[in-house]
Image (cartoon, coloured by chain):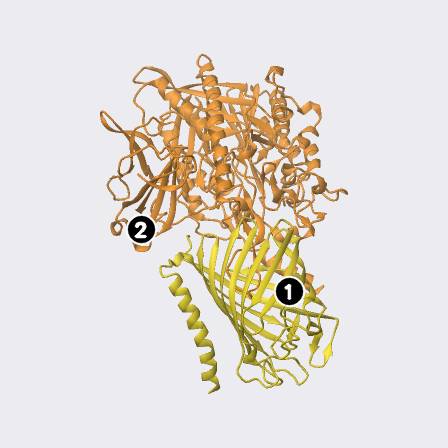
Chain colours: A orange, B yellow
Amino acid sequence: MRYKVQLATALLVAACGYNEIPLSTPVSEPPVPPGGPLSAGFGRADITPPPGPGLYAYGPEGREARGFRNRLYAKALVLEDVEGERIAFVVADLAVISVALHRSAAQRTLERAGIGADRLVLAATHTHAGPGNFMGVKQYDEHGTSVAGFDTTLVAFLAERIGNAVRQAVDSLRPARVGFAMVPVWGFTRNRSLGAFRSNPDSLKVYEPPADLNLDESQRAVDPTWTMLRVDVFDPGQARFVPAGALSIFAIHGNAIPSVNDLYDADIHAAMQRRLETHVDSLNGGTPSLAPRAVHLVANGAEGDVAPTFPEAGRCPPPKLRLGRRPGGPHTPPPAEEWRPISADRAAACMDASAAYVDSAGPALAERAIAIFGSLAGRLSGDVRIARAFRTVPLRGEGAPSDLCDAPRVGAVTLVGSDGSTTRYYGWKLFGLIPMGFEHGGSSVETKPRGCHAQKRIAFGSLQGLVVGEHGLPEVAQLMIVRVGRLALAVAPAEVTVNAGVMIKKTVLREARAAGVPIDSVAVISLANGDLRYIVTPDEYAVQDYEGASTLYGPQSATVLTREFGDMTALLAAGGQTGAAADVGEVVAYAGKLREVMPGRDAGPPPERIERRFVSLECAGDTAVASWIDIYPGRLVPADGPLLRVERETSRGWEHHLWDDHGSLEVRALEPKGSRGYLWETRWLPGETVPGTYRIVLEARDGFSALRGGPFGACVGEPGGPSGDSL
Amino acid sequence: MQALALRRRFQQPLCALALVACSAFPNVGSAQIVAGADVTYVNRYVWRGVTRTSVPVFQPDVYLAYRHTNSFLTVGGWWSLETRSGEDEISDTGPGVGGLGESNYWVELSTRGGPLDLAVGFARYLFDDDVPGGRDSSWNTSELYATLWWETTALIPKINLWYDIDAIEGAYIETSIDLRVPILPVAYMYLGALAGWSAGQAVRESAPSQPAYFEKDGLTHVDISVWASFRVGSGLSLAPELHVQINEDAATERTRVDDTEGAKVWFEIALSWAHEFGGRR
């Protein structure tokens, strides 16, 4: 008994260590009719932080970020109709959006563009190679990645740039024409929790591929709908409307890159976004620039149980608990256990397999997007009305829906990760024999459902309340429904499964018809304005796969969400202009330990005391590797601008080949060199680049002038060959 | 005088070991050095199945290692510090004395390839010159040793071979197997079974006055253990062990000066610290 009391006390102390942070309540300014037709504007902001934060969404397997590959962006589209109804869509290359980030960004967009939380749709691509540590939810801050902590500086960094992107979009508002299409795109996604999917009634299984595609069951059990809103804006110079960009919604988990990765990367969405942007730029002519002028936002749809069709070889096994390796002698006690990662060769093989997948699937998806974009050319209209309804729903305590569980709980399966992305805890059994729910289905299902959480086998059982803490998990849901012409977008702060998405779509359509709202199509935007983790149907919940175990408020979560969306749809009948349509309630964040994971602007010595210089340039097999001394991460912020470029020698001299926003080029902060600076490295895998002579140029920045490296030929060694071949 | 003698006793071997380390690796970079220290408390000091002290003992251990990829070259020292013993207690320092009973110094080369670990080394065992009723310098000796173990998901089989090249002569072999038992998602407990074998470290009929560890060659004891080793802080780990030993030799059966038992129970707990200098951030 005494032991139990001591244990409970210890857990209580651990659990209560959160920081209570009241968030702002930015409500949009009332619409002012602009005196013109529908207008649209796009914006883009680089949000690649310096190395330091943990890469979010692989839980304990998410590594500390050491650099970047494809840069991370926040892309914005602002629409304003004839009545002055504005809506801002922002899609950020992040794993999730926290309420803390949404409110913080909305505060900035309100100050700069009159757009508050109730008109800001902030969605995540769900890349698992984006930073964490901005959640403001204790358990997410502490366990969403291997780097624990909540960093207010990182929140401000991201919010500031998101605010800039929206401001840029508002500043570029021009008369516009828009049109949307919903086209099935099969073969790129699969259902990763097929057992749960199958448990649904047939009425929910509405998507059926053409028989000639010969897809297996998992590939058929997805929402294949690619929803695209194409936007053309008026170009005064050409006195005509020209293509400017698009907002896409497609259900695909943005986690093709495995957990052994240690670089920021926009993952498969990078190609999906950028190839269409380049295509649109080519339609408009003009000279290419570093960043495309067109903007393509790609948000996630009902992707909760959907994964890309990445190959098995692209997933790495998690680390294993083993006795440590350390020296000693005949009497030295046994070393402590440690998590031993897979070998570097194995990790490299995983990365190569996933990179090959991203390189093939990303462009192929982009080609579909280009086709959809082209098909909309003759179907654009400027006679489009905007409306929105926003609601802050408390999930517990006063005002919470009565059919939700009183307190959130995670199932044991949540700790083991999803199919294809399991964590180190997967398959654990007590004494190696007794299953404790650390698997998908099977022992994770409570055989005698009790209480509100029913079939969920709660991690740590009745101790979870102590382990997680009173406010350890999300407690509000920010829901939003947006009408753009005849298209409705249900904005969900969670990962909604395919069939939970069907529930929402059906309800919204039904309520719209009942209320006389003129919409005929509905899409779900997942992972926006907050993160409740997953939302599954009641039948899926009973199966307790990963998604069901991670549905925090019990089996009726999807029912409640659907009902709320239905209610909000009715508000659109009044144009979304009632006070109830802008319910930006007060929210308190209960963050984890406050910690500066993102290095500050004062890290290391100032630039004037550092001699920026190349240290080495060599071939490692087929990869060119250059290292150089530069300022410390924190002073060097990738988002501030280009860091380096590769130039190719031509008959006209040295010409730009690519810059450091490319899947073939990595930039990594290696190690501090004290007062001399910080050692950085870039690795460039030229691939099928034409033979020739190249050089790496460090851009002029941070008070340094440009620095050119020596010329070198493309490395032609065997992939993964020995390093050290001097160039 | 006693302090001076003690200092001399520590100084010589430590200087020799430092000399070996420095001459072998004159260009050691800071990123490749591992330092470690630990202290073990045992309720009785049992060595190769033989009760060396029947009173509690503290055993500090320090080492310095040079690391090259998966290999270590280590030099270190270990000391056995006895609490004061009674008249009927077995003791290395003699009845009622306590203090330093034994010093060991070693150099070891260890390497790992896949699941296999191999270590070879040299150990020097030193005792005081004049220890009435205890273990004196006639027991000073040196051994070469080799250890091979194989780490699988569930089992860790291990074989240790020691060969005495000095006072005792002959070999001693231990074969063991440890079963990894998950008790938490983040920790294992280990169940071990070990058998000790003498192959020349028993009393010789031809030289009965020569120091020997066992009465006869062959199986000396079987040890069943439960142990764990887990981190308790930055660089710190704790390793508790509980042993139940079945004695198969007259030497291993002794539990006190005048007592013999067919089995004995003992436990130990070790607090360890290790740090690799100059690792990347």
**Can residue A637 be seen at all in this image of the molecule?**
no
Residue B201: give x, y in percent of width and height.
62, 70
Residue A294 placement, left or right of B44 = left
Badge 1 amino acid: Glu
Badge 2 amino acid: Gly
Rendered residue at 51%/33% (across/down): A254
Q: Can you name the residue that lies furthest to the left here? A: A652
**Quick one: A241 or A385, which is closer to the camera?**
A241
Residue A39: give x, y in percent of width and height.
40, 22
Q: Regarding mark 1 in the picture, which secondary structure is present there? A: strand
Around disc 1, counting alpha carbons within 10 Å, would you say few (fewer than 14), some (14 to 19), or many (20 or more)?
Answer: some
**Quick one: A62 or A689, which is closer to the camera?**
A689
Q: CA distance from mark 1 to mark 2?
A: 47 Å
Total count of labels = 2
The subunit letter for the residue under badge 2 reads: A
Residue A611 placement, left or right of A581 = left
The subunit letter for the residue under badge 1 reads: B
Q: Nearer the viewer, mark 1 or mark 2?
A: 1
| Picture quarter with the C terminus of chain A | top left
| Picture quarter with the N terminus of chain A | bottom right
Q: Would you place residue A134 above or below residue B94 in this image?
A: above
Rendered residue at 67%/68% (across/down): B217
Residue B40: give x, y in percent of width and height.
58, 69
Q: Regarding mark 2 in the picture, which secondary structure is present there? A: loop
Residue B46 placement, left or right of A267 = right
Q: Which mark is residue B241?
A: 1
Q: Would you place residue A575 above or below residue B35 in this image?
A: above
Dot 2 corresponds to which residue?
A677
Residue A600: give x, y in percent of width and height.
37, 50
